[in-house]
Image (spheres, grey):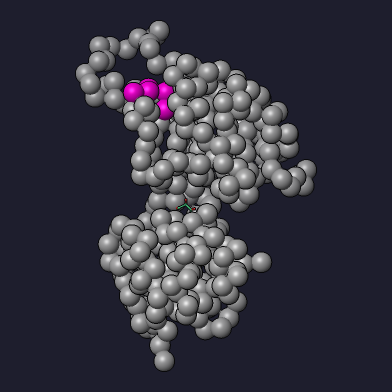
Amino acid sequence: MKKKILVTRWIFPEIIERLAASCVVDFHDQDTALPPETLADRLADKDGAITFLTDRIDGTVLAHAKRLKVVSNVAVGYNNFDLDALTRAGVMATNTPDVLTETTADTVWALLLASARRVVAADKWVRAGNWKGWQFHDPWYGQDVHHATLGILGMGRIGRAVARRASGFAMRVLYHNRHRLPPESEAGAQWVAFDELLAQSDFLVVMIPYSPAVHHLIDVEAFARMKPTAHLINVARGGIVDEAALIEALQHNRIAGAALDVFENEPHVDPRFFALENVVLTPHIGSSTRATRFAMASLAADNLLAALAGRRPPNLLNP
Ligand code: DGY
């Protein structure tokens, strides 16, 4: 008998076709998250699900999903899963690492350069008709990226891809991570303690996975330790940065700028950010190229189909 699966939001038709060859697919063909009660209801008779970062899969949902064998997240981050609850319930959990590494590293650089050189604010200023002619002492002095110090918090796959790109800018690369990399690793990156990373970075890039242990790791004290000329770039998860403290730091120029692709309560963006010229805001587009999103969806299908066929999925998360 064919296995029953739920695909919780829009995904490429080619992927649906592939899944439908061996499964009965309940497809929520909209690019919006299912409300939690609907998600739980629709999982009740399913063997597997393709999920997204907007789907919270925890003990409450699992209590309704007694047949469930696998949840396959279309993301590298999986803080939408209660992994302990999934493991206790005997449900396999998978994610999509590697395929988005380079694209997300590109996004980090787009944001870093935009923040350093005030690209978004300058664009708005030109569009508003403010430019009256080239000036040597123009109001748009930015900050040099070349030869500056890049600080990477979280030296996983994406952190290392960010570091590799830094050598083209002749930067000094520092990182903080639980595990130190071998000395010959990416771009001569040097491990430093967390406080040192805060104090020395001209550009601090947040790349750690979110868990309650790192909630608001970048807080008032962290901003106080940073250089007043520093920029913060976050493409990981919003909850790692205390947004109220960041807004305060930006309002009072305690740091020079920030670029955020992720927010504490997505899609809510604190409106106080909108009044600030020294912040760049993007809507969680770190992995957003068609090729990468397709690769993520394909890998999620591989994981799901392997698990349903009784094989170990390539990206199993459960211990
Ligand atoms: C991820 O994969 O975790 C991203 O945040 C979504 O693309």
Q: Is residue 8 above or below residue 126?
A: below
Q: Classify residue 35 by image quadrant.
A: bottom left
The part of the chain drawn in magenta is 275-279
65 or 30, which lies in front? 65
Q: Judge whether residue 246 is colored magenta.
A: no
Q: Is residue 233 above or below residue 7?
A: above
Q: Classify residue 22 by image quadrant.
A: bottom left
Residue 69 location in percent, x, y?
Answer: 51, 77
Quarter of the picture containing the C terminus is bottom right
Q: Is residue 30 left or right of residue 140?
A: left
* Residue 269 appears anywhere in the view: yes
Residue 176 location in percent, x, y?
Answer: 68, 38
* Residue 171 appears anywhere in the view: no
Q: Judge whether residue 276 is colored magenta.
A: yes
Q: Is residue 24 left or right of residue 77?
A: left
Q: Is residue 227 left or right of residue 119?
A: right
Residue 210 location in percent, x, y?
Answer: 56, 48
Q: Is residue 266 above or below residue 295?
A: above
Residue at the location (58% across, 81% down)? 311
243 or 121, which lies in front? 243
Residue 270 location in percent, x, y?
Answer: 37, 33
